Image (cartoon, rainbow, N blue to C red):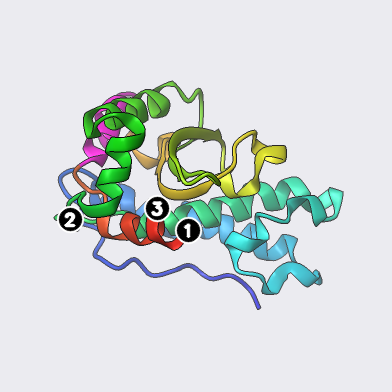
Amino acid sequence: MSYSLPSLPYAYDALEPYFDKQTMEIHHTKHHQTYINNTNIALQDMNFQNLPVDELITKLSELPADKRNTIRNNAGGHANHSLFWKSLKIGTFLCGELKNAIENDFGSVQNFQQTFENEATTRFGSGWAWLIKQNNGKLAVTSTANQDNPLMGQSIVNVSGYPILGLDVWEHAYYLKYQNKRIDYIKAFWNVINWDEATVRFNYIK
C-alpha cells in the first residue's frame, strides 16, 4: 500500500477571501503531493508502509536510522496537511464541550486566541502551531518545527499530545496573499476553522 493525496472536501476557492484559491491549489497539489511521493519512496520494501500515517509517525524510533529523518519530515508533512485540510471550513462555530474546555484551560476564548497567535507568530522559520489535548485531558497550545507533529512524542519533538487543530506557518501556506505578514494570515485563520472537526477530535481522546 502507498499513501495518496486526499481530496479536499471543498473547492479551492471555498475559503476566499481569507485563504486564496491559488495558494490552496498549489499547497494541496504540489507541496502536499511532494511529501506523499517522498514518503512512498522512503518506505519501499519496508514493513511500515501499511500503517496509517498518524500511526507511522508515532514509530519513528523503530525506523532504520538512514530513513528516519526522511520519513519524519515527509510523513510528518503528509499527516500535518491531511489534518489541516479537514480543519478548514467557513461557517462553523466554537461551542459545547470544546468551548467549555478552552475557557477552563485558558481562562477565556480570547486568551486562547492570543496564546495561539503568539505561538504561531514566534515560531521561528517554518513549522506549525497546535492546539493539543494532553494525556491529562487538559488543552495546551504549542508549536513544532518543520513538519514535526505532537504525535511524534516527547522524545522526538519535546512535546506530546493529540492535535485538535494545527496551523501551517510555512511561508508557502500564505506568502502569495500575505507576503511577509504572517500575523495577518494567522488572524485570518479564525475565520476558516472547522470547529465541528475540532470538536470531533477533542471528543475522540478521553
Residue 179: in magenta span: yes
Report if the CB atoms under discs 2 and 3 are less than 8 Å apart: no
Mark 1 or mark 2, whichever is nearer to me: 1
Residue tagged by mark 2? 92
Which label is found at residue 186? none
Disc 3 residue type (three-letter): Phe
Indicate left or right for 7 with 64 as reference.
left
| Residue 5 x/y as whole percent | 48, 67
**Which residue range is magenta in the image?**
176-190
* Mark found first going from the N terminus, 1 or 3: 3
* Mark found first going from the N terminus, 2 or 3: 3
Q: Is residue 67 visible?
A: yes
Residue drawn at point x = 85 percent, y = 48 percent: 65
Indicate left or right for 38 with 43 as reference.
left
Q: CA distance from mark 2 to mark 3?
A: 15 Å
Residue tagged by mark 3? 84
